[in-house]
């Protein structure tokens, strides 16, 4: 039987005195003049390493231990003792150090020197062995767990919506095509594409959102959420867009826009506060090394009610801001990232929910308001990132929905099942989409979205 414990637990003061086994990767080794070595071990369970004290008497001391370098994998047995050193409560006095795998220091990329995040993306298979990326992925995991917990506690059912879809839905972005047709043969033949030969008998794509399918479940099961991969082939090389990302989409029957906004606010606050509670050490790290003051900022967000503003008010604020923007702003035009960030960062200095956007810039399914010019849409903007949530109350009136589809040249035949929801027992309902990576970016303060997903997919890049 093994008495393995994770480094996280071994580092606790109350673990002193216990015999145990540690399994992990060497971060550094330092030989003391006293004839023993200090080895820092990390196993991914915490930001902090465990310091191992390896005495010169160990039989593989000269043959192996003194050759350990960053990246080697080891199993260490010994007894935890209170440590006299600063910054650690315990250290492990080794009785045996077994080397499982070597890491040639001539070629192992993660040497002591600091690497840029750009450089680390080239080693995405190894980069979670660094402090920052390890911390990001632990926080990402916590956010996912908290999301599931929040919805479970609030009576939302977890629904898996399809990844392959035939509806070019809602124009949310460019789509990736899914096909088994032989593209090279097609190109040679020069003829038109006959989709009856394709796998699904018609053009199909990777989903840009699970919302439409989500609505079918909300209008039978009441409250649901989806949490899955989402694909957008938009050719935007920005710090907040990925071609493949994860989206969380709650949808609730009998919800109006006010309910929807309240849900989004409670949801974000609970997720953020669980990050502070459960990832304290990692959050301290982000606070000190990535974005100064992050923890206080998040505490402020949890304590304060979110600010609200209509699109029309936002346009007025932007017009009278005296700011120079790259894109001009006028009622009816879509807000750009620079406008969103001005509003949330400069004007409000915290999260902001923008509502009531012009109908002309929003998809057909958003509910048309009494003024007939705007729709019951809401975006949640946060400092540093901009939009993290986009949502709306949905159009539940059959005649209005039909008219909106006609205006946007969408065929009701293609969306027959979606339209059916308005024919049979229609109800008011609402929902939103949260980009998981944008949430991780906000919580950690990481500047680039490519550093908060394990293997980023972006234009021209699908390594790993
Ligand atoms: P943006 O205007 O920032 O491009 P959007 O309005 O196209 O986003 P929605 O269709 O409203 O996005 O999607 C809901 C949420 O999904 C967004 O609020 C955002 O958090 C996230 N999201 C959208 N596109 C991407 C992307 N390419 N990469 C990562 N997250 C995204
Ligand atoms: Mn949006």
Image (cartoon, rainbow, N blue to C red):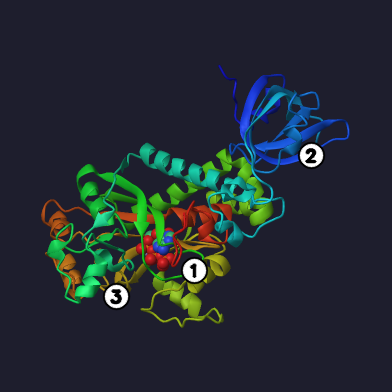
Disc on the earlier residue, 2 or 1: 2
Q: What is the spatial separation of the Cα atoms under label 3 and label 1, in whole angstroms?
A: 25 Å
Relative depth, front residue between 21 and 387: 21
Q: What secondary structure is found at the residue carrying circle 3?
A: helix
Visible residue check, residue 428: yes
The label number, if any, that marks residue 345 in the structure image: none
Tell me the residue at 78%/31% (across/down): 62
- Circle 3 residue: 360
- Circle 1 residue: 238
Select label 2 or label 1 by which is in front.
2
Above or below residue 74? Residue 305 is: below
Q: Along the horizontal axis of the image, is 38 left or right of 410?
A: right
Above or below residue 440? Residue 64 is: above
Binning the other alpha carbons within 10 Å of mark 2 as few (below 14), some (14 to 19) or many (20 upward) gives: some
Binning the other alpha carbons within 10 Å of mark 3 as few (below 14), some (14 to 19) or many (20 upward) gives: some
Relative depth, front residue between 451 and 38: 38
Q: What secondary structure is found at the residue carrying circle 2?
A: strand
């Amino acid at each position: 039987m093994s008495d393995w414990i994770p480094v996280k637990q071994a580092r606790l003061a109350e673990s002193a005195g216990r015999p145990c086994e540690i399994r992990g990767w060497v971060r550094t080794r330092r030989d003391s003049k006293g004839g023993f070595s200090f080895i820092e071990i990390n196993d991914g369970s915490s930001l902090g390493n465990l310091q191992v004290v390896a005495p010169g008497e160990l039989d593989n001391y000269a043959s192996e231990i003194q050759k350990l370098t960053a990246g080697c994998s080891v199993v260490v047995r010994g007894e935890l003792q209170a440590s006299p050193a600063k910054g650690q409560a315990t250290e492990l006095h080794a009785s045996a150090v077994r080397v499982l795998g070597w890491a040639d220091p001539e070629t192992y990329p993660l040497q002591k020197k600091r690497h840029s995040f750009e450089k680390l993306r080239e080693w995405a298979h190894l980069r979670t062995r660094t402090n920052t990326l390890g911390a990001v992925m632990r926080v990402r995991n916590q956010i996912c767990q908290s999301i599931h917990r929040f919805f479970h506690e609030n009576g939302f059912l977890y629904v898996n919506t399809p990844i392959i879809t035939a509806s070019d839905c809602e124009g949310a972005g460019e789509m990736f095509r899914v096909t088994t047709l032989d593209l090279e043969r097609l190109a040679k033949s020069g003829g038109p594409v006959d989709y009856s030969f394709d796998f699904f008998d018609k053009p199909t794509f990777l989903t840009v959102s699970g919302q439409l399918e989500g609505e079918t479940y909300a209008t039978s099961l009441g409250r649901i959420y989806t949490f899955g991969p989402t694909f957008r082939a938009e050719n935007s090389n920005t710090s907040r867009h990925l071609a493949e990302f994860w989206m969380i989409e709650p949808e609730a029957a009998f919800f109006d826009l006010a309910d929807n906004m309240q849900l989004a606010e409670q949801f974000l606050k609970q997720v953020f506060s669980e990050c502070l509670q459960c990832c304290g050490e990692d959050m301290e790290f982000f606070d000190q090394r990535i974005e100064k003051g992050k923890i206080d900022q998040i505490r402020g967000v949890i304590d304060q009610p979110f600010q609200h503003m209509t699109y029309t008010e936002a346009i007025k604020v932007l017009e009278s801001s005296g700011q120079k923007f790259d894109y001009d702003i006028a009622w009816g035009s879509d807000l750009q990232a620079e406008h969103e960030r001005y509003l949330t960062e400069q004007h409000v200095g915290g999260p902001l929910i923008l509502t009531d956007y012009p109908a002309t810039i929003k998809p057909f399914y958003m509910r048309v308001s009494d003024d007939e010019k705007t729709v019951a849409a809401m975006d949640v903007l946060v400092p540093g990132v901009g939009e993290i949530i986009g949502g709306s109350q949905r159009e539940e009136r059959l005649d209005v929905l039909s008219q909106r589809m006609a205006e946007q040249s969408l065929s009701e035949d293609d969306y027959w099942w979606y339209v059916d929801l308005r024919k049979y027992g229609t109800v008011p309902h609402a929902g939103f989409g949260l980009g998981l990576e944008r949430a991780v970016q906000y919580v950690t303060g990481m500047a680039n979205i490519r550093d908060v997903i394990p293997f980023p997919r972006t234009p021209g890049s699908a390594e790993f």
